[in-house]
Image (spheres, grey):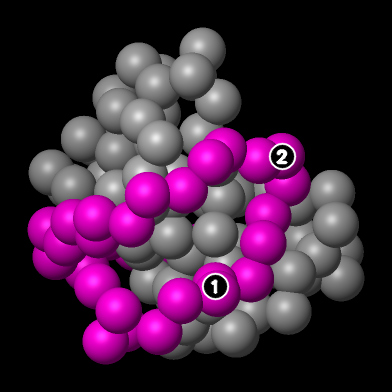
Amino acid sequence: MDIVLTIPKKQYERHNNILREVMEIDDRVLLWVFKRIPKIEVGECVHFVKNGRVEYFMTVIGKRGYRQQTLMMKYPIWHTEIIAVRGFQGFRYKWWSDNEI
């Protein structure tokens, strides 16, 4: 089941720098640690909210850590999703269908 995460405004610049590195270097992955573990499997997606909309997603390529609380994600191809959404804390499960985009 895909999940949705909000990037806090104060973290935009830092996250953009990390994302740029992940996109430019083929073998780089993004690690994301969760306090509450989402129900997500390898091959599913994590969608990121920035600037009041879901902007892009990354694909989960692995899970590790105690009770698999760390996701390893890879950026597949540039994909922009134009879905307006208010920010929130933590994560949510994806609520829209792909044909709504």
Answer few, some or many: residues within 10 Å of disc 1's Cα (few below 14, many 20 plus, some between 14 and 19).
Answer: some
Q: Position of residue 18 (x, y in %)?
A: 34, 32
Residue 56 appears in the picture as rendered: no
**Could you tell me how far apart the alpha carbons at marks 1 and 2 are, in whole angstroms?**
14 Å
Which residue position is annotated with label 1? Answer: 94
Give the side of residue 57 with respect to residue 35, left or right.
Answer: left
Q: Judge the density around disc 2: few (<14), some (14-19), many (≥20) Cα neighbours within 10 Å.
A: few
What residue appears at the point 54 percent right and 59 percent down from the top-left corner?
4
Q: Residue at x 81, y 65 (%)?
A: 37
The kind of secondary structure element at disc 1 is: loop
Q: Residue at x 57, y 38 (%)?
A: 87
The part of the chain drawn in magenta is 72-101
* Quadrant of image for the N terminus: bottom right
Residue in the foreground of this view, choosing between 53 and 45: 53
Q: Residue at x 24, y 73 (%)?
A: 101
> Tag 2's secondary structure?
loop
State which quadrant residue 71 falls in: bottom right
Residue at image mark 2:
89
